[in-house]
Image (cartoon, helix red, strand yellow):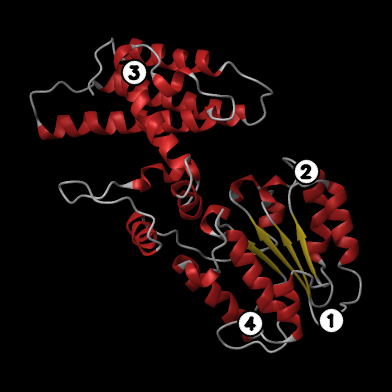
Amino acid sequence: MSDYQINQLPWLADPHQRFVDQHYRGKSSHAHLFNIDKALGGDKLANAAAQTVLCQQLTPVGACGQCKSCLLLAAGNHPDLYIIEPDGNQIKVDQIRQLCQALTQTAQQGGARVAIIVNAERLNLAAANALLKTLEEPGDDVVLILQTNTSAQLLATITSRCQTLNFVEPTKSEIHQWLAAQQLLPAANAEGKIHDVTWCLSVVGGPLALANSLTSQHYQQLLTFRQDWAQSLKTGHLSNSLLKVSEQQIVDALNVLYLYLRQYVLKSNKLKTENTSRQSLNPLVQSKVIELAGRVMTMCHRLETMPSVNAQALCQQYVLAFRQLTHYNVLY
């Protein structure tokens, strides 16, 4: 993912300034929860918050960038900053025990000790329980920052002990403007219209991931999946990219199918409200298509832990299920 700085991500400006204000006025908590996806820069905000806490000459707008602590952070070797990331799919109990032990030591720079836990939703049960005591009694000048993509997966006993930083996600329009500023949008077509690349935000996860997709072949692959799903659902046979989708690509392909099915129902509703001569889906079929979309999303989650899958057979299964639900009368 591209290495954007926090000052290049306008949707993080307000939460960053709020964190700085709280710490500058001495109103900050010892434990913070940033429910901000990494694809939105949640880990970058956590790093900036850590720099705020560790800075020896903090200003009203953030870390000074010039003190010894800031220079150590910039070099990536500050001895009083601890960063915990998942080991595989989990953050394990030994990682947290080692962290808690380290936080009991005297700060080498004579100031605060800061721990960042990235993807905190991946704390396994034993690790989460091991963290509770430190969250309750962290010791003097210890600050914990938990970044999570999905706070709903965290134990309530964890979230209740943290101060949650309020955050408002950028709108699609704001993301579109940001991508334009980064010169990442495709050229306008003959009619002067610019293709809306934000359709796949929920697939990639957020604007930073989308920016990365647009600078690689990933975005084009997602677009190809969308086109080929439309053709496959119309004909009943897998088309082009879906005939050779790999195990590594299947989650992306199914996420695109999920979006397509949702959009399919929305288009049907639009036909009904426009009162056109074109036939729309009846409510029962609509509900079944939405149910099928739910099954697709459930499978996406299961595939994250499944050792192997016949990707083509899975895709064909959903094509046939869709056509049976719609009685082979595909609208689009």
User: Which residue was labeled with disc 3?
Assistant: 233
- The location of residue 322, given as percent across then percent down, is 37, 16
Q: Kindly report which numbered mark, 1 or 2, lies closer to the viewer in this rendering.
A: 1
Lateral position of residue 77 relative to residue 25, left or right: right
**Image height of 160 relative to 31, above or below:** above
* Mark 4 residue type: Ala
* Mark 1 residue type: Gln
CA distance separating discs 3 and 4 = 54 Å
User: Which residue was labeled with disc 1?
Assistant: 109
CA distance separating discs 4 and 2 = 35 Å
- The location of residue 190, given as percent across then percent down, is 17, 46
Q: Which quadrant of the rendered structure holds the C terminus?
A: top left
Of the pair 284 and 7, the residue shown nearer to us:
7
CA distance separating discs 2 and 3 = 42 Å
- Of the two numbered discs 4 and 2 on the same chain, state the one appearing first in sequence: 4
- Of the two numbered discs 1 and 2 on the same chain, state the one appearing first in sequence: 1
User: Which residue was labeled with disc 2?
Assistant: 125
* Mark 3 residue type: Leu
User: Which residue was labeled with disc 4?
Assistant: 63
